[in-house]
Amino acid sequence: MKRIALIFLLLLQSGVIFAQVETDSVKSFNNPRAKHAIFFEIAGSGGLYSINYERVIGENRTLRGGISYVNGDGFILGQMLTLPLSTSYLLPTDKDSHIELGAGNTFIISDGEFTNAIGPIFGIREQDLFKGGAYVRISFTPVLLLGKEVSIVPIWGGISFGKSFK
């Protein structure tokens, strides 16, 4: 019981010290105000398109999950479900511009076959991490496809747009 009380007091003390160091005029990436984003991506990690949710964690790291479903009826593609997952690190270049470096893993089920697509993410985004608002991103996402056969798609990328919020 004494240990729990001591841990609680230490956490409370560190929060008070941190609150005194930060001022309203100094914005820190340690506590972004707009931690959530919902966006639509054309091409990119999700295949032809995807609808995604992203959360800023820590200072400037992100976790993303999305979904896409295509029912091509054999015209160009058959049925395809993709679930893109990724994590990225945002390097701020100014108030609301960031260079994005990350890694992604997309699970693909196409015509009853499972494929896993892994690869890096290199991007540029406009997103105000403090106030929220518009979210625009251009990314380069080459992939390694791991299924029945292994193949590389060296040139692939996407454009994303959406909204970030608190």
Image (cartoon, rainbow, N blue to C red):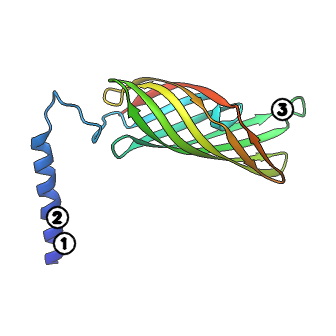
Q: Nearer the N terminus, badge 3 or badge 2? A: 2
CB atoms of marks 3 and 1 within 8 Å: no
Crowding around mark 3 (Cα neighbors within 10 Å: few <14, some 14 to 19, many 20+) is few
Amino acid under label 3? Gly
Spatial CA span between label 1 and label 2: 6 Å
In the image, which disc is placed on residue 8?
2
Relative to the observer, which residue lies in front, 99 or 83? 99
Type of amino acid at the residue the image marks with label 2: Phe
Residue at 89% from the left image edge and 29% from the top image edge: 75
Q: Quadrant of residue 78?
A: top right
- Going by the image, does 141 lie left or right of 162? right
For marks 3 and 1, the one nearer the N-term is: 1
The residue that disc 1 covers is 4
As drawn, 45 above or below 160: below
Q: Quadrant of residue 89?
A: top left
Q: Are marks 1 and 2 in contact (CB under 8 Å)?
A: yes
Q: Tell me the distance, in whole angstroms, between the alpha carbons under discs 3 and 1.
A: 57 Å
Residue at the disc numbered 3: 72
Q: Is residue 63 left or right of residue 95?
A: right
Q: Is residue 131 above or below residue 66?
A: above
Image coordinates of residue 152 in percent, x first then y, are: 75, 42
Q: Residue at x 11, y 56 (%)?
A: 13
* Picture coordinates of residue 1, whole percent (x, y): 17, 78
In the displayed structure image, the side of residue 129 where residue 99 appears, left or right? right
Binning the other alpha carbons within 10 Å of mark 1 as few (below 14), some (14 to 19) or many (20 upward) gives few
